[in-house]
Amino acid sequence: MIRRTLLEWESIRYGDAADEIPVLAAERIAAVASASPLASRRGGILEHGRKAIRARGVVGVIAASGCTLEILPKIDVPGEEGGRATGNIRRRLVHMLAVALDLKIEAGQITALDWQRETMLEILVRLFSEKLVDAVRQGIPRRYVEHADDLPVLRGRLNVTRQFTTLAVAPSRLACRYDALTPDIALNRIMKAAITRLSRIARTPDNQHRLRELAFAYADIAPVPVPALRWRDVVLDRTNERWRELLNLARLLLGERFQTTSGGGSEGFSLMFEMNTLFEEYVARMLRSALSHTDLRVVSQGGRLYCLEDEDRRQIFQTRPDILIKRGDAVLQVIDTKWKRITGRIDDPKRGVSQADVYQMMAYGRLYQCGKLTLLYPHHRETGCEEGLIGNYAVNSSSDRLELFSIDLSHSDRLKARLAAACLPRGAEPEN
């Protein structure tokens, strides 16, 4: 099995060396990547050149026959190199997914060696399969489902209309409607679909063994293709609340959150994450936690005010700021998250900030009557300064301020305090 790892926007050359990829393997990987639904929306996941393939701004795992390419986000890990740095990047990415999906990952559940040795996909498969094994041991959920059948004896209640029309010539049969307790419900069908898909792509013996055990446990559940799964039919209440985490993980692995999956046959499989979306959700959830003890409220993808109105008074060009910080109905701050790497001041006085992003923030300030505008980026060492407030600009002809703020994703222990510092008024105490 050929397995290679690179960071987003990095290239890997063709060849047989450890830091290269064979031409045939690269062609297979590129073919699977081009078939991903995400590729059509972003203009491609990989750049397939004559001498190398280059990752773009998408991370995840692309698996083809006999080869796997893992693309990880560019997250600085100071003081570490090689496998240790790669393992820590995987750990940070899984942490972001856990926060965004309300998952609990116990300390020590995955060892430092596992983070270095296994791909992100195998780690996610392990988390899912271990949690599902524990849940199945406590019992597969069942619900009462209504059935309609023609029986020799009455069960439940009689379907009078069918009995005296269709069955009028067959009085030996009774048209019955009854409720039966069954495990063949939407939640279990989703779990079986996840087990079936992961069984085809898991490579480690431990993952394969657990998935085989789970396939046996779900043998009586009807198989349903992934596109036909009825997610809205899942009912979570106090009797099965413990399945919420597993449902979120299955939604992630089957392509319903932050990414698109493709595959299902032997040709290949891809699990690709849109880091812009994941970073936004991660920041929003961390901010809610950091500001939970205050009177401030975090609203993600809210606002939805329109920029223009035509002659028919019809509003057009709706806005959806990433994050609004509100007190009551008043908008105190507009935050736009950007999964981009800003530069040092010496290299570029604009620090690599997009002019379109600045124009967008100006529009937000006007529409939402908000004087505090923040562009929030992941921190990295090339910024030439410490994380936190790295730029503070006055907006001409107004009292508004545009801030550039960065957060170091390699230090989750202080992340909430840093985010709170970006939002709380001066003198207020952030939550630790």
Image: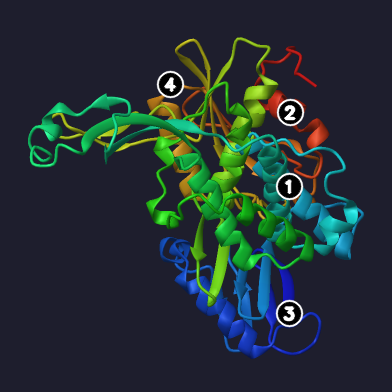
**Category of crowding for the residue at label 1, using alpha-carbon neighbours closer than 10 angstroms: few (below 14), some (14–19), many (at least 20):** some
Q: What element carries label 1?
A: helix
The amino acid marked with disc number 1 is Glu
At 40% across and 55% down in the image, what residue appears? Answer: 227
Q: Which residue is under mark 1?
A: 130
SS at circle 3: loop
Give the spatial CA distance, label 3 vs label 2. Answer: 41 Å
- Give the residue at mark 3: 1
Q: How far apart are marks 4 and 3 (CA)?
A: 57 Å
Say left or right for 90 vs 257: right
Report x, y in % for residue 191. 55, 47
Name which of mark 1 and mark 2 comes first in the sequence.
Answer: 1
Q: Any mark on residue 173, and which?
A: none
Amino acid at dot 4? Gln
Q: Cα distance, mark 4 to mark 2?
A: 27 Å
Sequence-wise first label, 4 or 2? 4
**Nearer the observer, 320 or 271:** 271
Disc 1/disc 2 C-alpha distance (Å)? 29 Å
Whether the residues at callouts 1 and 4 have beta carbons within 8 Å, the answer is no
Image quadrant occupied by the C terminus: top right
Mark closer to the observer (1, 2): 1
Mark nearer the N terminus (1 vs 3): 3
Q: How many marks?
A: 4
Report the mark closest to the observer, 1 or 3.
1
Q: Which element is circle 2 on? A: helix
The answer to whether marks 3 and 2 mark residues whose Cβ atoms lie closer than 8 Å is: no
Residue picked out by circle 2:
416
Disc 3 residue type (three-letter): Met
What percent of the width, then of the height, locates residue 317?
29, 39
